């Protein structure tokens, strides 16, 4: 049983990193999916020095491996996930997974000194976990408490830590030295990380697997289009990732008007 769960998650995780980690930076920008495509396509192929990419040779090789895994494993899995679930179910799953990230977001709100945003995070968790049916719904959004996301990479940036070189991690995808370290800290922030029981292990693996599919499914069409139309897919994704992180980190706040949120991609679901 354990081996089968581990194997399933290991097949999915490469694709999560390969594509979804960069595209998860698209957090909150309206209801125009074409804007995502335009932004990615217009991301210039900057020189390595300007892009902070001194390890471009290594990064391109890792990107090619990750992209192959995404095309051959994750995309078919995401299409299968879409085929067997309704768009309202997928929306509910995305809400539920976002609710589970509350401890990470709350800790980083506090570390950044964002007391008001920390209050919003806690309020959203209480409301959505109760009248939101355990987080499947988002009544907090409807009453005006907007969702936001924070991570330790952003916290380090607010503290003045430089991003370091751009780095494409094997299986984990686009990152920087700072963001890669921050991701490890965020993982350790989750309470489930410290619970060493079989149920906790199953919980970690199952939420990881579902999270991979939930993050990748709304991006099937735009990424296929960008991959086929881009003159340099690697350079476009690199530029987009770095620009998106810069927007998120600005003043320690995420601009949800300029960037699209995976949870708001209802247009893609209407293609069914």
Image (cartoon, rainbow, N blue to C red):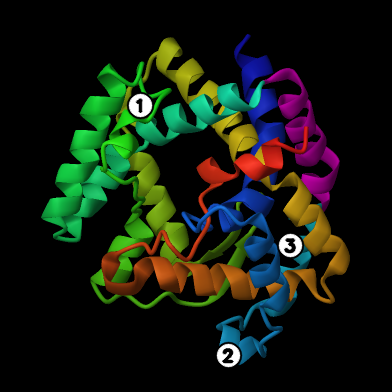
| Label placed on residue 192 | 1
Specify the segment rendered in magenta. Answer: 68-85
- Where residue 153 sits in the image (x, y, percent)? 37, 61
The image shows residue 160, relative to residue 144, as above or below, that is below
SS at mark 1 in the image: helix
Residue sitting nearer the eye, 111 or 244: 244
* Quadrant for the C terminus in the image: top right
- Where residue 185 sits in the image (x, y, percent)? 35, 49
The image shows residue 10, relative to residue 182, as above or below, that is above
Look at mark 3 in the image and give the residue it sits on. 63
For label 2, the crowd category at 10 Å Cα-Cα, with few meaning under 14, some 14 to 19 and many 20 or more, is few
- Where residue 138 sits in the image (x, y, percent)? 37, 30
Q: Is residue 80 magenta?
A: yes
* Quadrant for the N terminus in the image: top right
Q: What is the distance, in whole Å, between disc 2 and disc 3 at their CAs?
A: 19 Å
For label 1, the crowd category at 10 Å Cα-Cα, with few meaning under 14, some 14 to 19 and many 20 or more, is some
Residue 195 horizontal side relative to residue 33, left or right: left
- Where residue 66 sits in the image (x, y, percent)? 74, 53
Q: Main secondary structure of the magenta part?
A: helix
| Label placed on residue 50 | 2
- CB of mark 2 within 8 Å of CB of mark 3? no
Q: Residue at image x 23%, y 71%?
A: 159
């Amino acid at each position: 049983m354990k081996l089968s769960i581990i194997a399933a998650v290991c097949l999915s995780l490469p694709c999560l990193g390969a594509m979804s980690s960069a595209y998860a930076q698209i957090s909150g920008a309206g209801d125009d999916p074409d804007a995502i495509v335009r932004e990615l396509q217009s991301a210039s192929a900057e020189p390595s020095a300007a892009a902070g990419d001194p390890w471009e040779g290594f990064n391109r090789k890792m990107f090619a491996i990750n992209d192959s895994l995404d095309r051959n494993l994750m995309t078919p899995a995401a299409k299968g996930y879409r085929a067997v679930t309704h768009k309202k179910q997928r929306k509910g799953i995305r809400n539920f997974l976002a609710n589970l990230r509350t401890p990470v977001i709350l800790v980083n709100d506090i570390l950044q000194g964002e007391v008001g945003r920390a209050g919003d995070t806690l309020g959203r968790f209480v409301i959505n976990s109760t009248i939101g049916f355990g987080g499947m719904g988002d009544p907090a959004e409807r009453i005006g408490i907007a969702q936001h996301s924070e991570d330790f990479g952003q916290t380090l940036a607010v503290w003045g830590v430089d991003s370091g070189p751009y780095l494409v991690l094997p299986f984990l995808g686009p990152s920087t030295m700072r963001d890669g370290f921050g991701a490890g800290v965020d993982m350790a922030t989750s309470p489930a990380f410290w619970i060493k029981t079989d149920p906790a292990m199953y919980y970690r693996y199952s939420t990881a697997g579902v999270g991979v599919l939930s993050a990748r499914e709304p991006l099937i069409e735009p990424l296929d289009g960008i991959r086929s139309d881009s003159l340099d897919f690697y350079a476009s994704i690199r530029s987009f990732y770095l620009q998106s992180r810069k927007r998120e980190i600005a003043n320690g706040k995420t601009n949800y008007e300029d960037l699209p949120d995976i949870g708001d991609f209802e247009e893609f679901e209407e293609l069914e």
